[in-house]
Image (tube, rainbow, N blue to C red):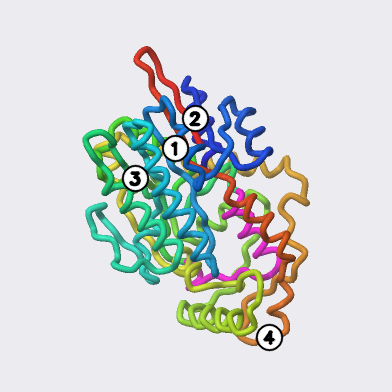
């Protein structure tokens, strides 16, 4: 998300400043034509320095984990957002655009919402959904005469630069771990990453303070059609094995229990949180964004898939091979002994987290005789 937004802003003539936690991130930011600011969401000094002279902040950082990471998500998604808000107020920023998620509506079952005015669940299902909902509430309630705050709520984000969703699906399929739920024949909302960027920039320009906006791709799809299309960019068939929803849910409960019982590292092959996000129908209306912001979702599914197909055809096979750890198809008969096979050395786990969450807000500034933007 962050790199696509930087490139859009830079190509539009904005000056971009980005918060970065590592040498690799700093080098990537410079390569994209932006100015890196060393620090993270817990570093108020770095946040304020990055926002100095900025008019607009895009906050797109998030910890996205679906197992035993509640503390991390509270620190990154909630407290990190609180820090961003404080820094905005101290630095005189006039607009904050928060990249929220359609997951804030998750209850563990189907998600159907025709309006952003529908109330959020009192207790969204899963630590990720709860933390994003809490962060969104913080942002929207901070709207004032001096700081306009807006949120956009994309569902599953896909497209070039995706280092999480598609690679995880590919690994699951190649390791014979992937199964459909209810054959995947349920409606599922998606949003190409450049469509999310389009909506975020429009929210900055035209969004009503204190308002959230759904963003989706123009073409509707089912989960099966979506995943099959993504995997086709690699010439990988997803297979046809499927579980009914009730069996998949029971499986997730069973595996979660075993992981807790044996204090296993890594995560179960399936969790209830993950099922709630990708194994249930999701139907949203982004009509408010289209009417109020002029959002169009200009990247079509066909164009996005063709771009992925071209990009992946130039990658070495090792870039998307399954990890060496043993990954198996979901099975109620999976033995307790096998629960320990996915364990990582603690040092490697820490390294993975530093790489996974090496993102932060995006700062933008506009001058009287032009525009400039800064990202974190």
Instruction: Give the mark, 2 or 1, whose residue is nearer the N terminus.
Output: 2
Quickly name the residue at label 1.
197
Decide whether residue 38 is among the magenta residues: no
Q: Which of 103 and 229 is in front in this view?
A: 103
Distance between mark 2 and mark 4 Cα atoms: 48 Å
For the residues labelled 2 and 1, say whether their Cβ atoms are less than 8 Å apart. Answer: yes
Q: Could you tell me which secondary element the residue under label 3 belongs to? A: strand
The magenta region covers: 163-184
Instruction: Give the mark, 4 or 3, whose residue is nearer the N terminus.
Output: 3
Q: Nearer the viewer, residue 176 or 123?
A: 123
Instruction: Give the mark, 4 or 1, whose residue is nearer the N terminus.
Output: 1
Q: Could you tell me which secondary element the residue under label 2 belongs to? A: helix
Spot the residue most to the front. Answer: 45
Q: Position of residue 66 (x, y in %)?
A: 52, 65
Distance between mark 4 and mark 1 Cα atoms: 44 Å
Distance between mark 2 and mark 1 Cα atoms: 8 Å
Label drawn at residue 151:
3
């Amino acid at each position: 998300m962050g790199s696509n937004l930087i490139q859009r802003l830079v190509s539009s003539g904005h000056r971009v400043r980005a918060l970065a936690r590592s040498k690799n991130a700093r080098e990537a930011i410079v390569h994209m034509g932006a100015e890196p600011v060393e620090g993270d969401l817990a570093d108020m000094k770095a946040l304020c320095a990055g926002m100095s002279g900025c008019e607009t902040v895009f906050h797109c950082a998030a910890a996205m984990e679906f197992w035993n990471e509640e503390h991390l998500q509270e620190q990154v998604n909630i407290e990190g957002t609180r820090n961003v808000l404080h820094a905005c107020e101290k630095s005189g920023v006039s607009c904050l655009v928060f990249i929220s998620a359609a997951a804030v509506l998750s209850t563990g079952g189907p998600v159907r919402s025709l309006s952003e005015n529908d109330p959020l669940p009192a207790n969204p299902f899963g630590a990720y959904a709860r933390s994003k909902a809490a962060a969104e509430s913080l942002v929207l309630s901070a709207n004032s005469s001096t700081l306009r705050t807006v949120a956009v709520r994309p569902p599953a984000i896909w497209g070039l630069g995706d280092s999480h969703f598609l690679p995880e699906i590919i690994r699951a399929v190649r390791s014979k771990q992937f199964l459909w739920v209810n054959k995947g024949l349920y409606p599922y909302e998606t949003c190409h990453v450049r469509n999310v960027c389009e909506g975020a920039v429009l929210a900055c320009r035209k969004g009503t303070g204190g308002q959230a906006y759904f963003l989706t791709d123009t073409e509707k799809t089912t989960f099966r059609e979506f995943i099959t299309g993504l995997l086709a960019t690699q010439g990988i068939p997803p297979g046809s094995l499927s579980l009914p929803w009730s069996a998949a849910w029971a499986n997730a409960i069973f595996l979660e229990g075993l992981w807790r019982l044996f204090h296993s590292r890594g995560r179960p092959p399936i969790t209830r949180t993950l099922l709630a996000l990708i194994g249930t129908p999701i139907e949203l209306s982004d009509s408010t964004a289209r009417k109020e912001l002029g959002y169009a979702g200009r990247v079509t599914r066909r164009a996005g898939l063709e771009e992925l197909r071209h990009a992946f055809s130039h990658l070495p096979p090792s870039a998307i091979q399954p990890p060496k750890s043993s990954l198996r198809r979901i099975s109620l008969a999976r033995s307790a002994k096998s629960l320990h096979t996915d364990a990582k050395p603690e040092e490697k786990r820490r390294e993975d987290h530093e790489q996974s969450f090496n993102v932060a807000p995006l700062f933008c500034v506009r001058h009287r005789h032009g525009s400039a933007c800064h990202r974190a």
